[in-house]
Amino acid sequence: MSFNLPANVILPVDRIDVRLNPASHPFERDNAEAIAAGWLEHQAGNPALFDGTMVLLSSLTYDGGVLAGVCHEVRYSTFLHWRRHPQTPGAHHAFAHAMPVSGDGALVAIRMAAHTLNAGKVYFAAGSFEPIDFVDGQVDMHRNMAREVMEETGLDLDAAVPEARHHLISTPGGVVIFRRYRFSQSADEIAAQVQAHIDTDPEPEISEAVLIRDASMQPVGMMSYMPALVGWHFARA
């Protein structure tokens, strides 16, 4: 089991080969009692949490622009236990960020709703990989990004123009794999569309769209890795 990515460095990704192993993740197997106890604590603090399924990595390597890894289906409670012990050997988390870029050059981020685990945090609409994001055992990044962005914002990534290349940054909270998607609409038009989606959702995951128009903007609640992504974007806008 290996993880060789340098921390807090943005790297280009030309090919992604992350596969789903049907075997149980050793981290979930070896920590079953602690995971169950921790879940009871999380539920007591936030009864809205649901112990669904997602995936957790057992290996992830980067070599010559190729990102390769192996992951396993786990319960959400297992992920929450991993968040308390992120330095555990043989376990790591990765998630994908679509970076929506408006026709007038702004980035469109979101603020998470008060009932969510990341309440008040600002980042790009995203979610952990789930088993449904794998096609023939291999992760489909666009499938995951499009699903999460549509669920949270109502925006259709298939109506935007994606960049050919992904990039990544490895952080203590997980590996962020990101890709810019360019929309023709202005930032204000996209924000209005997102707000309309929030208004029609009985239990929205987000509270608002957050427009980032230049590299100096750092909204309250911005996730720690976000300034690096924002700076990278505007340096290459």
Image (cartoon, rainbow, N blue to C red):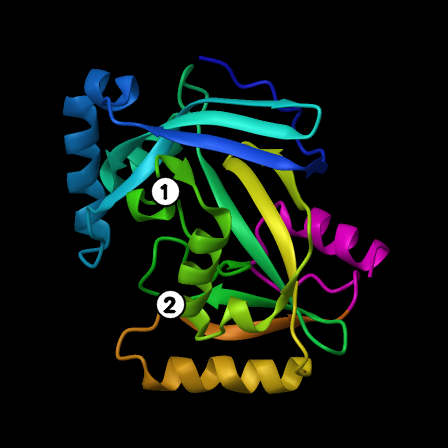
Q: Is residue 10 left or right of residue 54?
A: right
Question: As drawn, which residue projects farthest toward the front?
Answer: 136
Q: Position of residue 10 (x, y in %)?
A: 71, 38
Residue 231 highlighted magenta (yes or no): yes
Image point (46%, 61%), residue name: 146
Q: Residues within 10 Å of mark 1 (few under 14, many from 20)?
A: some
Q: Where 49 sits versus 41, above or below? A: below
Marks 2, 1: nearer the viewer: 1
Identify the residue under disc 1: 134
Q: Regarding mark 2 in the picture, which secondary structure is present there? A: helix
Q: Residue 139: x percent and y percent?
A: 43, 40
Return the disc, 2 or 1, that comes first in the chain's sequence. 1
Q: Please provide percent x and percent y for residue 128.
A: 40, 46
The magenta region covers 214-237
Image point 44% across, 12% down: which residue? 1
Give the label on residue 151, or none: 2
Give how far across and how far down residue 55 sits, in percent: 33, 36
Circles 2 and 1, Cβ within 8 Å, touching? The answer is no
Residue displayed at 61% across by 70% down: 160
Q: Residues within 10 Å of mark 2 (few under 14, many from 20)?
A: some
Q: Amino acid at mark 1?
A: Phe
Q: Going by the image, does 209 lie left or right of 135?
A: right
Magenta region includes residue 199:
no
